[in-house]
Image: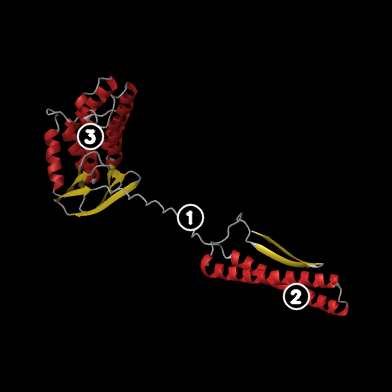
């Protein structure tokens, strides 16, 4: 059996026996030590990786070794996964696993020199991205894959680096050549500016003047008084004819009464006309009124009617 075969067999034996994994060999992402069930499941995956590697199915072997590491972290799983990916031609994945193995394996690990030599050769064909995520960023990824270290080996070409800033994704593309070391910095966007509060519309200040309805009412009153004056004047003229026909004291008194009434109505009509004119020119606010809304009070209305021997004026405000 080869040296690497002996290493694989020894690691399987360690996992199966349930010997605790050294603390320095545990994954940094692991929050607790693996249970006995985890170690047994890891041993099965490790054995599957060994069989696949022997058969030359290197991708399946690499995936099995990585599953074993995820369930029971041990640097030997990283070493075997890196070798498998290298044999499969996935040199970037192999390089990242070699680098992780060198970070986690103890100084006296038997394959440190081999891993370091393999990584040095692969870096000649690869580029390295040194990632810097600013405050407020999380879930750092390269080409959609989560990274476990700020230094990531990639193949030459264009790559997508992204992270999350809350609910927003921050992205940057970077083109690299073989052998290059490129620094990529992601910065969270500034927080959105608060929306300005809408201006509160103040109700229009009262102008201190009368509404236009006053003029309309005054005009209607003036017209009504003018009509009453005409009617009273005709009545007085009719009484004069009656007196000329029958010159009695009663007809004379009635004529004087109707004349007084007509004179009073004439003065009232003139006064109403003058007041309405003054209001229309100086006292009324003729600005366009606000649009009437449902529920507003109805506008002022005025109705003029005639009855037997009288005039009727009705209105609402």
Classify mark 2: residues with Cα within 10 Å, few (<14), some (14-19) or many (20+): some
Residue 221 location, quadrant: bottom right
- Going 13% across and 49% down the picture, which residue do you hit? 124
Q: Which mark is residue 125?
A: none
Neighbourhood count class around disc 1 (C-alpha, 10 Å): few under 14, some 14–19, many 20 upward: few
Does label 3 or label 1 sit earlier along the sequence?
A: 3
Q: Secondary structure at mark 1?
A: loop
Image x and y of residue 103, in percent = 17, 34
- Tell me the residue that label 3 is attached to: 78
Cβ atoms under marks 2 and 3 closer than 8 Å: no
Q: Quadrant for residue 71, please give it.
A: top left
- Work out whether residue 287 or residue 245 is closer to the camera in this orientation and state it: 245
Q: CA distance from mark 3 to mark 1?
A: 75 Å
Question: Marks 2 and 3: which is nearer the front?
Answer: 2
Closer to the camera in the image, 50 or 198: 198
Measure how far apart labels 2 and 1 are at the Cα level.
51 Å
Pointer 2 or 1: first along the chain = 1
**Residue 202, image quadrant:** bottom left
Q: Residues within 10 Å of mark 3 (few under 14, many from 20)?
A: many
Quick check: 269 left or right of 283? right
Which residue is under mark 1?
203
Which of the marked residues, 2 or 3, is nearer the chain's N terminus?
Answer: 3
Q: Residue at x 21, y 48 (%)?
A: 185
Name the residue beneath numbered marker 2. 233
Secondary structure of the residue carrying numbered label 3? helix
- Contact? badges 3 and 1 (CB < 8 Å): no
Q: Position of residue 20 (x, y in %)?
A: 25, 21
Examine the rendering and report whether any part of residue 15 can be seen.
Answer: yes
In the visual, does 201 lie left or right of 7?
right
Residue 87 falls left or right of residue 41: left
């Amino acid at each position: 059996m080869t040296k690497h075969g002996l290493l694989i067999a020894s690691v399987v034996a360690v996992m199966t026996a349930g010997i605790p994994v050294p603390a320095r060999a545990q994954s940094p992402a692991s929050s607790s030590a693996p249970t006995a069930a985890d170690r047994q499941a890891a041993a099965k995956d490790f054995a599957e990786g060994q069989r696949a590697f022997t058969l030359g199915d290197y991708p399946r072997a690499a995936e099995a070794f990585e599953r074993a590491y995820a369930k029971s972290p041990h640097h030997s799983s990283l070493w075997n996964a890196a070798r498998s990916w290298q044999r499969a031609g996935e040199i970037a994945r192999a390089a990242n696993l070699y680098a992780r193995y060198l970070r986690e394996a103890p100084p006296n690990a038997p394959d440190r020199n081999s891993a370091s030599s393999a990584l040095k050769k692969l870096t000649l064909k690869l580029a390295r991205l040194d990632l810097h995520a600013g405050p407020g960023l999380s879930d750092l990824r390269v080409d959609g894959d989560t990274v476990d270290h700020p230094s990531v080996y990639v193949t030459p070409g264009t790559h997508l680096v992204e992270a999350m800033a809350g609910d927003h994704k921050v992205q940057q593309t970077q083109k690299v050549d073989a052998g290059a070391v490129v620094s990529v910095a992601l910065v969270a966007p500034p927080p959105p500016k608060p929306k300005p509060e809408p201006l509160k519309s103040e109700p229009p200040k009262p102008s201190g003047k009368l509404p236009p309805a006053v003029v309309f009412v005054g005009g209607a009153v003036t017209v009504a008084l003018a009509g009453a004056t005409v009617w009273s004047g005709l009545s007085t003229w009719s009484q004069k004819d009656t007196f000329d026909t029958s010159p009695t004291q009663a007809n004379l008194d009635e004529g004087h009464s109707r004349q007084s009434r007509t004179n009073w109505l004439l003065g009232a009509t003139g006064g109403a006309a003058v007041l309405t004119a003054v209001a229309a020119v100086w006292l009324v606010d003729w600005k366009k009124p606000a649009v009437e809304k449902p529920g507003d009070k109805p506008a002022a209305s005025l109705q003029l009617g005639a009855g037997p021997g009288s005039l009727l004026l009705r209105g609402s405000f």
